[in-house]
Amino acid sequence: MIAQENALMNDNAPVSLLPSMVLAVIPALNEERHIEACIRSLMQGEADLRRVLLVVADGGSSDGTVAVVNGLMDEFPNLRLIDNPKRLQSAAMNLAVEQFATAGMRYVVRCDAHSIYPGGFILKVARALDHTRAASVVVPMDATGETCFEKANAWIVDTPLGSGGSAHRGGRKSHYVDHGHHAGFDLSIYRKIGGYDESFSHNEDAEYDERVAQEGGRIFLDADIRIAYVPRGSVKALARQYFNYGKGRARNVRKHGKRLKPRQAAPIVALLASLGGLAAAPFFLPALILPVGYLGVLCLASLAVTAWKRSACGLLAGLASGVMHMSWAAGFLKETFFPLSRA
């Protein structure tokens, strides 16, 4: 059991953490807009960061992502670029570990190309793993936007009406959790459970966490290590993202047999109630209270965010919230009743 392994590790004197013990990986696909800012943020804060191997695993970008990364290699000699033919983030992580994780490496840090990282992030995550002896360290995400829709999306996603109150969305308390935004892994445990399941295009993180828990491992949310995340900037992109999230969650439920939490079931109830109300309205007009009531909640959310942030961009918050809810629920139901081979 992983818990037994961790207990044995705690009995030993801690080994000084060296940069050579850490591998950092950025899965990327068409991230020309964000990749340079991401890499530069990861290299700021401590001189030792320039000695941590940083691998960008590109899934076949059709924009300028590869050119941007190649252009940074002279400035950052520790930067590497590999091709990820399977394109998925799960495959990117497994491939990087397979190719670059040497026998002397103890931890792997996962980085998101859409994120801006605080100074020293990579080594802070590695130290948190070293200190807690957790199987994984996860971190809170603080969403931030540039365009009006990105701002509205960012403001609502960190609230219960957006992400449903997930601990890693704006969480302020460090504690052990069952799931969170992946930041770092103990490599011995990563290898023991087989890394990410590459059949998952989305929700691969929650699926990984489920296997860690089954083996007795613990996941630590370090609220002192925070990242800024730029959310999707259009309705279409947001809908596609959350539709795939919903499909991934359905596959996770099917694979491991766990029930949804109330916050996860709520969007499904909202979608089915709204559709049911619309279908019943020609025969029973009061049924419209279901979809109208839901729209009313979204409108109130828009007004509340507008007043809170003192910005007209807040008027789009309800739209962003509704897109998240309906797309996630549609994806979940689609994968549940009409499953395909990949999430």
Image (cartoon, rainbow, N blue to C red):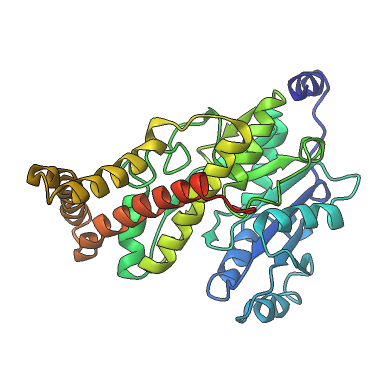
Residue positioned most to the left: 285
Taking the image as shown, residue 286 lies to the left or right of residue 147, namely left
User: How many marks overall?
Assistant: 0
Q: Quadrant of residue 14?
A: top right
What is the quadrant of the N terminus in the image? top right
- Location of residue 67 with respect to 226 vertically, above or below: below
- Location of residue 218 with respect to 8 vertically, above or below: below
Q: Residue at x 19, y 51 (%)?
A: 278
Residue positioned most to the front: 283
Q: Quadrant of residue 327?
A: bottom left
- Location of residue 273 with respect to 69 vertically, above or below: above
Q: Residue at x 15, y 45 (%)?
A: 293
Residue 95 visible in this rendered orientation of the protein: yes
Foreground of the two, 317 or 68: 317
Q: Residue at x 65, y 75 (%)?
A: 61
Taking the image as shown, residue 253 lies to the left or right of residue 23, namely left
Q: Position of residue 213 (x, y in %)?
A: 65, 27
Q: Position of residue 254 (x, y in %)?
A: 58, 37
Q: Position of residue 118 (x, y in %)?
A: 55, 54
Taking the image as shown, residue 192 lies to the left or right of residue 289, namely right
Q: Position of residue 141 (x, y in %)?
A: 47, 48
Foreground of the two, 326 or 84: 326
Residue 217 visible in this rendered orientation of the protein: no
Q: Residue at x 33, y 44 (%)?
A: 159
